[in-house]
Image (cartoon, rainbow, N blue to C red):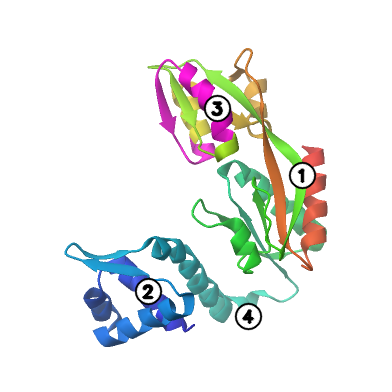
Amino acid sequence: MQLKAIETFLCVAETGGFHAAARKLNVTQTAVSARIRLIEEETGKPLFTRGAGGTSLTDFGRQFRPYAEQMLSLWSFASHDLPAQTLNRVALRLGAQLSIWDPLLVDLAVRFEKSLGPLLLTLNYDHDLNMVDAVATQVLDAALTHEQPTAPRIQAHELNPERLMLVEKPSTGDPVFVNLELGEVYQDHVRSAARQAAGQTLFLGNCLMALRYVLRRGGTGYFPEYVIRDHLSAGELTPVAGAIDLMLPLYLVTRRGSATSAGILTCLTDLRAAV
């Protein structure tokens, strides 16, 4: 697939139309249509729908968009920045499906670098990007996820589950339950806790944003124990009496035969043991 086709797809998605994309790219509308058709023929899926309200992405188009952005970004890096940075460096691309593992991902990268030396490092946290697919298609080298994958090209290493504690801080206004929406296992567990909250339920997708919100405004929510440990020790948060901890499954996903998978697994296992 040509990179110009990917660039054109993203331009149409951004500008909202084939005419506008053609003007921005300084090409004919026929060229834009041909490039979009090339992707659609290779994927077997339509990318856009056209109607009275203009051009909009199909469901597949929305799913394809982050991959297209990643492809352009990787190509730009590989063609311009990579040659000067690869000397004596190990390339490592890590991702996490859930925001509660942002700190863990960073700590893993630091530990891996101490083990193998300077890295050519990419960290990717994205709710929309399927991390298992990203590993299978070699967009990422490894990823953390809470769902056990079944793809044949993927090797899943089951780790000790992540312990989430229900904690609270007295609210300065109406009581609030912070819901991180971390998948079905999480939602099944927290549903009763959310109902018990006397005030509103606030949906925040990012763990650290939600934690900051609770610390500044007050409220209740489930957070990873290792993220809130210092706040518990300082008395800024308190465990909710009688609440049952949530043990969220954790898997390290790598490709079978990956040269870095053993080192990543060792570093992550050592890191969690230290934590």
- Residue 9 bears which disc, if any? 2
Let me know if residue 201 is in the magenta part: yes
Residue holding disc 4: 83
Between marks 3 and 2 in the image, the one whose residue lies nearer the viewer:
3
Foreground: 44 or 135? 44
Residue holding disc 1: 159
Helix, strand or loop status at disc 1: strand
Separation (CA) of disc 1 from disc 4: 36 Å
Helix, strand or loop status at disc 2: helix
> Residue at point 59% right, 23% down?
166
* Left or right, 33 with reference to 144: left
Question: Which is more N-terminal, label 2 or label 3?
Answer: 2
Q: Residues within 10 Å of mark 2 (few under 14, many from 20)?
A: many
Foreground: 158 or 263? 158
Residue 56: quarter of image:
bottom left
Foreground: 190 or 66? 190
Separation (CA) of disc 2 from disc 1: 39 Å
> Residue at point 67% right, 21% down?
233
* Amino acid at circle 1: Leu
Between marks 4 and 3 in the image, the one whose residue lies nearer the viewer:
3
Separation (CA) of disc 4 from disc 2: 27 Å
Identify the magenta region: 186-209
> Residue at point 47% right, 75% down?
43
Q: Residues within 10 Å of mark 4 (few under 14, many from 20)?
A: few
Residue holding disc 3: 190
User: Marks 4 and 3: CB-CB under 8 Å?
Assistant: no
